[in-house]
Amino acid sequence: MAKNKGPRRPRAETPKGFRDYFGAEVTARKAMLDKIAAVYHRYGFDALETSGVETVEALGKFLPDVDRPNEGVFAWEEDGDWLALRYDLTAPLARVAAQYRNDLPTPYRRYAMGPVWRNEKPGPGRFRQFYQCDADTVGAASVAADAEICAMLADALEAVGIERGDYVIRVNNRKVLNGVLEAADLWFPDDPEREAERRGVVLRAIDKVDRLGIRGVEELLGIGRTDDSGDFTKGAQLKFEQRERILMLIKGDRWANNLVGFDYLVGESETGKQGVEELEQISDLLEAQGYGPDRIIIDPSVVRGLGYYTGPVYEAELTFEILDEKGRPRQFGSVAGGGRYDDLVKRFTGQAVPATGVSIGVDRLLAALAMKGRLDTSAQGPVVVTVMDRTRMTDYMSMVNELRAAGIRAEMYLGNPKNFGNQLKYADKRQSPVAIIQGEDEAAREVVQVKDLILGAKLAQDATLEEWKSQPAQVEVNRADLVATVREIMGRHG
């Protein structure tokens, strides 16, 4: 007779496309975001936190990499309404700007940082939950707002440790792109649905150039493309001449900062010419502030894939080389992007509200800093006060409180104190810099043993006997000198 195994135990595993973040990673991310927030605050932007859940109606149909509304998000129905986890921080801002338009200043300048969720196919380094860091100006029609966003983005990158020369911010204008599409006979003013559909396919194709290369984009502009997994993506079905004109954008390095070349790309399109004029204004404004082509350039190859952009668009690219999974050198690529979206708030108000902003990919920027050796992921643990005598817990807790009051991170060992060796193993696992030891004998003499765990680890690795004796890793000090001694040891190790 088979035994009843009872209820099935849940598997202890992270859902596909998600990941967990531990102490050092969380600390490093917070430190980086604090530096970015300081730059945004210096520019006069205010912090905003919106709900992680929005109505699907408020999110709209501007979803990344999909063709139909309500795909790409985690959504559910509740009391007749469809709700979804936010997929970016821009759509919630549009809702806030409309909802509180009578209370907010105009222009409204805000920054926001937090997780977003996308129900998309996960892959290497591509997760369904990730952090974004945004800054936007709502209510300013002048391209001076766009120039300011670009300058602020440059300052933010340098503030977190991306040196000048290791990045470039590329700026284009969606009106220029529309002019190119018009010149390529892809403009259908009498059939807006057809225009939006064809333009969306083209934009998403061009925006994948970093991942797919020129050949991959060319396939998406034509019949379509089959990826490595065998999945087929239908293309834009463009003619050869149309494809060639659009592919000139991808090879845009030849046009960088060459506004005469821009005139050639847009042909006789009035929309395109207006875009070129706006780029000239942005270039002049940035140059006047000292942001030259060593940091920010005008480049027609930047398109940005999202359909809601209406004017200037920009992308921050890190230019230093890394090795890919096959050991081949390549540039790190984009870590931030944004642009002007003058029609997004209009969905709520019925009135055009100009807006522009940028979003930083937090995880990618953290990865870049780690590759450059500018990210401290070796988080130092707390000072550990060991327990030698269970009857003296109040004395040990008093030591912990003194250290904390002095601004020193500290904790008392709360496991089973029977095996003292396990307490020191715990301190090592916590990456503690110092351990405090006080047994019955030390208590009677009103002293403590202070063990320098960092020095001890170094001496254990390669120190000679003479060095071990001359640099004792454990010292006995008066109980009253506990805080001063710990502070001196920690200061010695930086």
Image: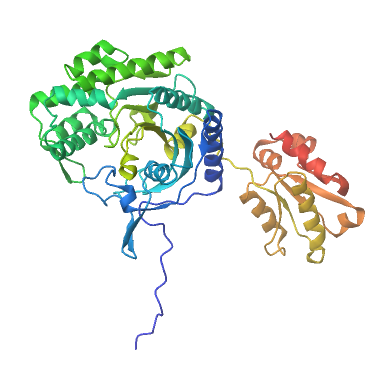
Near-viewer residue (244 or 49)? 49
Q: Position of residue 28 (x, y in %)?
A: 54, 40
Question: Which residue sits furthest top?
Answer: 260
Looking at the picture, does residue 423 appear above or below residue 171?
Answer: below
Question: Which residue sits furthest right?
Answer: 445
Looking at the picture, does residue 19 appear above or below residue 283?
Answer: below
Q: Give the side of residue 261 with respect to residue 460, left or right.
A: left
**Where does the C terminus fall, quadrant-wise?**
top right
The number of numbered discs placed on residues in the rendered structure image is 0
Q: Give the side of residue 251 with respect to residue 295, left or right.
A: left
Q: Position of residue 123 (x, y in %)?
A: 32, 46
Q: Give the side of residue 96 with respect to residue 75, left or right.
A: right
**Where does the N terminus fall, quadrant-wise?**
bottom left
- Tell me which residue sits at (42%, 26%) in the image: 145
Near-viewer residue (317 or 238)? 238
Q: Give the side of residue 181 with respect to residue 71, left or right.
A: left
Residue 245 quadrant: top left
Near-viewer residue (399 or 137)? 137
Q: Position of residue 340 (x, y in %)?
A: 34, 31
Near-viewer residue (322 or 349)? 349
Question: Which residue sits furthest bottom?
Answer: 1
- Render colour scheme: rainbow
Q: Is residue 303 visible?
A: yes
Q: Position of residue 144 (x, y in %)?
A: 41, 22
Q: Is residue 119 visible?
A: no
Looking at the picture, does residue 23 appear above or below residue 374?
Answer: below
